[in-house]
Amino acid sequence: MSINQRQFEQLTEMGISLWQTRNSDNTQPSLNSNLLYLKQSSITLKKLTELTFFIDILTCFNLSIGEVTPQTDHLNCGLFNWFFSAQINMPTTESIQWCDNKLISPSIELLSKSPALKKQLWQTIMNNL
């Protein structure tokens, strides 16, 4: 069954993951080719700024909201690019990755609900920045 890009994005936002074939116009960068990333925009950044947990993380990096710019599939934080995995099942404790100044983590909502993920995020930050 084939769907268009708009339908795919809507299903992804609802938390429904789909398999898709890789083609030449797929421009999603990844450490793991099986990962899809949450789309980012000025609207999603504005929603993130309303979350205390996100603000606390930025404060940890000595970053202000003005220094973070949304890109298509990540947030450009200056020192690194932050990608949010679009996986919908509960992440494992191996969910946070760092490679080539790219931080890949579950969504802020999942991070803020899991003490184990918070700990892993903090350890990843301390080991790589």
Image (cartoon, grey):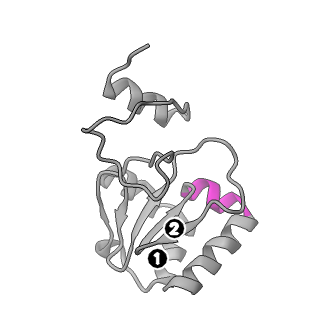
From mark 1 to mark 2, how far is it between C-alphas? 6 Å
Residue in the image at 70% along x and 74% along y: 119
10 Å neighbourhood of mark 2: few (<14), some, or many (≥20)? some
Seen in the picture, residue 129 relative to 102 is either above or below; the reply is below
Q: Amino acid at mark 1?
A: Leu
Residue 65 in the image: x percent, y percent?
Answer: 35, 72
Quick check: marks 1 and 2 in contact, CB under 8 Å? yes
First to last magenta residue range? 108-114
* Front residue (pair 9, 113): 9
Residue in the image at 67% along x and 42% along y: 89
Q: Quadrant of residue 66?
A: bottom left
- What number of labels is visible? 2
Residue in the image at 34% along x and 50% along y: 43
Seen in the picture, residue 127 relative to 86 is either above or below; the reply is below
Q: Quadrant of residue 78?
A: bottom left
Q: Secondary structure at mark 2?
A: helix
Residue 104 in the image: x percent, y percent?
Answer: 50, 62
Residue 122 in the image: x percent, y percent?
Answer: 62, 78
Which residue is denoted by mark 2 in the rendering?
Answer: 54
Name the main secondary structure of what is drawn in magenta: helix
Residue in the image at 68% along x and 65% along y: 117
Q: Secondary structure at mark 1?
A: helix
- Is 112 part of what is drawn in magenta? yes
Residue 46 in the image: x percent, y percent?
Answer: 37, 57
Which residue is denoted by mark 1 in the rendering?
Answer: 58
Q: Amino acid at mark 2?
A: Phe
